[in-house]
Image (tube, helix red, strand yellow):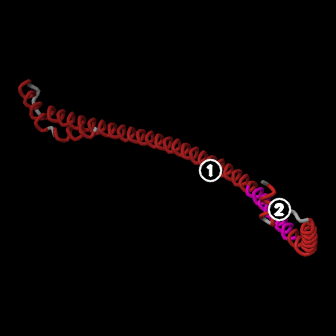
Amino acid sequence: MAPLLAESNPLLTASPGLMIWTLITFAIAMTIMYKLAFKRIQDAIDARRKAIAESVEQAERTKSEAAQLLDEYKQQLASARAESEAIVDRARKAGDEMTTRIKAEGEEQRREQIAQTQSQVQAEVERAMSDLRRSVADMTMTAAEKVLRGALDSSAHQKLVEQAVEELDFSRLQKVGASS
């Protein structure tokens, strides 16, 4: 059956003359293509390969620079963090020192005020005691004067003491006692 197919279709039959002319035509076409087109195609491919290689190298350099910049940024960030922590620590220490100093100054002022108040109280007590002594001396003088003026009998003496007591200025004694 194979011969039937070959006889019926002329394209399927092998013809030696056609084969030779096909090979010659193919060789001429390849030579022309090699001389004219393949060199241009190869140059375009080489240019494209070179451009791609340069782009890859540029990308690698950019990646390397980016990595270097990232490392520098990380170092700067770490340095800034360390510096900010140092600033916060200094501020905290300064605040603690200021708090301690203010507390000490407040305590010193409190002591000074207490000492001043105590000295004022002491002065008031001494002044009150002095006023009281003066008042007692005045009353004693007044009583002695009245005793000397009057009679020395017991009823007159009793009357004289009651009169001296009535003449005493108790409001003055109360003021002296209240101020101390």
Tell me where residue 82 appears, x and y as whole percent.
Answer: 66, 47
Mark sitting earlier along the chain (1/2): 2
Q: Looking at the image, which residue is at 94% across and 70% down?
A: 24
Residue 23 shown left or right of residue 54 in the figure? right
| Mark 1 nearby-residue class (10 Å; few <14, some 14–19, many ≥20) | few
x and y percentages locating residue 51 in the rendered image? 82, 67
Please provide percent x and percent y for residue 61. 79, 59
**Front residue (pair 111, 20):** 20
Quadrant location, the N terminus: bottom right
User: Disc 1 designates what residue?
Assistant: 84
Local secondary structure at mark 2: helix
The residues colored magenta run: 43-66
Relative height, residue 40 to residue 76 (above, below): below
- Amino acid of disc 1: Ser
Residues tagged 1 and 2 counted as in contact (Cβ below 8 A): no
Type of secondary structure dominating the magenta stretch: helix
Which numbered disc covers residue 53? 2
Q: In terms of secondary structure, where does tag 1 sit?
A: helix
Left or right: 175, with 153 as reference point: right
Between residues 10 and 157, which one lies in front from this camera angle?
Answer: 10
Vertical arrangement, residue 69 with respect to residue 122, above or below: below
Residue 159 screen position, x and y as percent:
7, 30
Q: Nearer the viewer, mark 1 or mark 2?
A: 2
- In front: 136, or 140? 136
Gap in angstroms between the C-alphas marked 1 and 2: 46 Å
The three-letter amino acid code for the residue at tag 2 is Ala
